[in-house]
Amino acid sequence: MAAREEELEAELERERDSYLRELVSTLEEIESLVLDLSGANGDAEQTRSLARQIHTIKGTAGSLGLDLLSLAAHRMEDLLASERPGQDGNDKFIDRLLAQNDLLTSIAEAYLDDNARFLDDLRCQAVSGDAAPRTDAKLEAHLDRVLIVEPSVATLQFCTKVLQELGSPQVSSVRDGYEALGLLLKEKFDAVITSLQVPTIDGQCLVTVLRTIPGPNAATPVVLLTSAAGTLDRAKVRPDYVVEKNLGQANELSAALQRLACRPSAASSESKARALRKILLIDDSREIHALVEAFVQTLR
């Protein structure tokens, strides 16, 4: 009996693998179909053909136990059914379809590569309609440039999508706190989104350093993403907003960014830097000491 179950499982794995490899090519064809819709909003037959393919992906992926693919396809199917863009909104509609198709491709490749971390991150974020921001509001001009500090590809894609939906034109990203600190000590950003758990310098420590060292981002607002808000150290500097990683995080992140966009501009960090004559840096990393010392030299 056990041998038979193992044989069936192996057969299912082969079937999944074959389907996923074929699906990657199919999604390239779907991308072409989506782009074809941009011509005079596409005709009804093109839309029906695209809807049939997405519906097939949803059903086949579900039957093979590829839950994330089925959910993502379901969302794309809902998008096709619910959107009725006019001429002015057609580009945005096409962009949303292309973004969802890219997500399907990323999920298929993650299944093929056995990328469990990527897939688990997506499951935590619940790839469904609830994960999308439900607002058409645009960010104000002073949030044009945003830095995301995030090692997870899935979370990075999620944050980038929220920012794009809100109209933030320039989004940069790094994978660890040390690299982020290097950027933040040299370049001005309008907001920072960081996860609590990032390599080298965690998100909360990064906020502390930013608020302590004079520089272009000493007053830059920070949004901290975490799945355990209760573990934050209250003795350290707190971020401007804390967004928990759960089913409602898209709406929470969107709301936090809109509130930040409505803030009055902070006073010039350059004037603050001139008022400081002595700095104490406590860190066990020689690299960070050297980096901070080099930056402080540029302020003199």
Image (tube, rainbow, N blue to C red):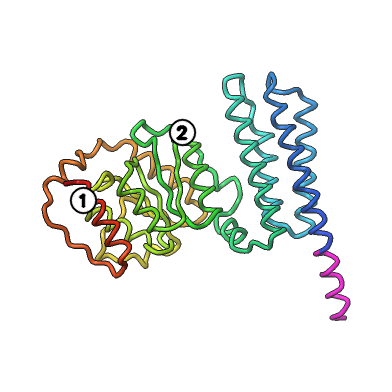
Whether residue 4 is in magenta: the answer is yes
Quarter in which the N terminus is drawn: bottom right
Q: Position of residue 180 (x, y in %)?
A: 38, 53
| Type of the residue with mark 1 | Gln
Q: Position of residue 186 (x, y in %)?
A: 31, 46
Q: Is residue 269 left or right of residue 61?
A: left
Relative to 159, residue 36 above or below: above
Q: Residues within 10 Å of mark 1 (few under 14, many from 20)?
A: few
Residue that label 2 marks:
167
Which of these two is toward me, 278 or 108? Answer: 278
Residue under the point 75% across and 60% down: 65
Q: Which residues are magenta?
A: 1-13
Secondary structure character of the magenta stretch overall: helix
Relative to 108, residue 231 above or below: below
Q: Which mark is residue 297?
A: 1
Rounded to the nearest angstrom, the CA distance separating label 1 from label 2 is 36 Å
Relative to 34, residue 15 above or below: below
| Type of the residue with mark 2 | Gly
Tell me the SS state at disc 1. helix
Relative to 288, residue 248 above or below: above
Tell me the SS state at disc 2. loop
Assess whether mark 2 and mark 1 are in contact (beta carbons under 8 angstroms). no
